[in-house]
Amino acid sequence: MNDTHANSIGGTKSHRIYLLLKDAILSGRLAPGRKLPGELKLAEQYGVSRVTVRRAMQALNEAGLVARKPGLGTVVLQQPLDATVMTASVANLLPNMVKMSKASHVRLLEFCYIKPPEPVREGLGLRDGERVQRSIRVRMADDKPFSYLVTHVPERIALHYNEADLSQTPLFALLERSGVRVDHAAQTISATLATHEVAEALDVSVGSPLIALTRVVYDEEGRGVEHLDALYRPDRYRIQIDLNRTGDEAARYWEPMAPESQRMETEPHEA
Amino acid sequence: MNDTHANSIGGTKSHRIYLLLKDAILSGRLAPGRKLPGELKLAEQYGVSRVTVRRAMQALNEAGLVARKPGLGTVVLQQPLDATVMTASVANLLPNMVKMSKASHVRLLEFCYIKPPEPVREGLGLRDGERVQRSIRVRMADDKPFSYLVTHVPERIALHYNEADLSQTPLFALLERSGVRVDHAAQTISATLATHEVAEALDVSVGSPLIALTRVVYDEEGRGVEHLDALYRPDRYRIQIDLNRTGDEAARYWEPMAPESQRMETEPHEA
């Protein structure tokens, strides 16, 4: 069963149970070898019929996620590590460009100038009436979409580049080319569900889980120069944060690691 | 409409549309003032009837998320900032203990000794046959659950504390009390959906989005001492990562900030 088969909120109940359990298996929360509850138990838990549970189990079976063992029930199978999963280190929040290789490219879905939505206006600290350039891009690796990026840039900066530039060059490089001195960024990570538009762009079912990252980038004067809302497919992208415990006995705390190997000095910023 | 009203996969289609749009509004992706597509358009997009869309719109309206303006359609309303949202800085991934205050406590759902699941055995680098102490805890702030924590600790360490200890004291404090010299941690952040058990514990609908964090903590000899799978309600918890752009012209990179204010030297580790 392919996720895109049920790309509407009207997707069947069995498909939704399939999605939930697939997600739990791929994330490792349902460990290989673990026995799933019986049909009756699952039917009770999810408030559906046994026929519905059976269909979900069939789909999991066909997808190679579980195996039905006579007399034992349904057990979770070991999953091969998905070679397409990229991780971004906290030091740069850049996907591993080696893995992404040359196959990574961008689809530009929208490019326009608008009055900023309030959270963007506030985040960027814009004056009343100041407009922003809004873009929506989907980033692909090996022709598979993994991120949905909505960016807002103050008009005065965005006028230095055009639509064609943005479909070929990372925004970060365009900002620096426009004379912006990027200084720091504030980021928040959350989780969300794929709505219709996003599901279509990322080739997932409506209602699939996505990593949601919001970033505001500032220049040396503390002015907001970029507002990013990024949504990532968790099966293709993960954020990695390694920490060191430092300080002496009386005052120990965690400190993020920024090893040399995590620094991407010449590679462009992902967004 | 309360999320818990439809705490089964059999939740109505209108409830699922309500959840998706609520999520988009609370996350700011559907900005205040923005007009939603018409009933017909939404019905098409989500593959449901207009009646279903109308019910979802009624629920959004009753929840104060949108308003129906005659002649204008349905527009998104400005949402008050939820005072219960906690943020954890990357420097310690500790929720803001000031906000959590004394009202934070833990419900211990499970405490047992088991043969480790393979990802845990591998993550902790355990010898064949070595057992682990597994616990499931739900952390609450102001009596509202915000995180679901599944931890595995090697038996030789876990034998230094008992069930009562874990229901009152953060695991991190118990580890250090047991003589463990915590040194560093590897963390991955992803997103997932709430399954039946988790949905019940966190008081959300089945299929709601959750932030998923996996952490392996190591001691000074590089031995794994704790494996954590944490699930967070994104409406009550977010992870914050602030970055500095450093280095000279030829070699600029991002570096995580760890300002004094983010250090929690005396407060216990959240998990």
Image (spheres, coloured by chain):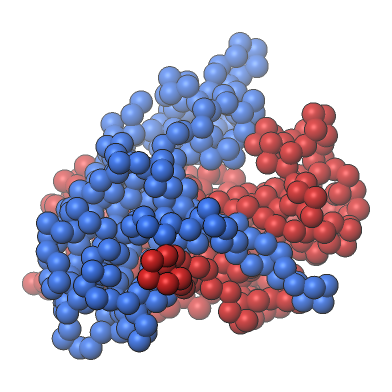
Chain colours: A blue, B red
Rendered location of residue A135, percent (x, y): 20, 62
Q: Is residue B42 left or right of residue A74?
A: left
State the quadrant of the N terminus of chain B. Answer: bottom left
Q: Nearer the viewer, residue B35 or A251?
A: A251
Residue furthest left as drawn: B71
Residue under the image location 22 percent in, 56 percent down: A169
Residue furthest top as drawn: A70
Q: Is residue A116 left or right of residue A205?
A: left
Residue under the image location 59 percent in, 53 percent down: B187
Rendered location of residue A92, percent (x, y): 45, 61
Q: How many marks?
A: 0
Residue furthest front as drawn: B250
Q: Nearer the viewer, residue B213 or A103?
A: A103
Q: In this orientation, does residue A54 appear? A: no
Q: Nearer the viewer, residue A193 or A214?
A: A214
Q: Is residue A240 above or below residue A72?
A: below
Q: Is residue A77 above or below residue A153?
A: above
Q: In this orientation, does residue B199 appear? A: yes
State the quadrant of the C terminus of chain B. Answer: bottom right
Q: Is residue B220 left or right of residue A232?
A: right
Residue under the image location 58 percent in, 38 percent down: A28
Residue under the image location 80 percent in, 40 percent down: B132
Rendered location of residue A156, percent (x, y): 17, 79
Q: Quadrant of residue B22?
A: bottom left
Rendered location of residue B221, percent (x, y): 80, 50
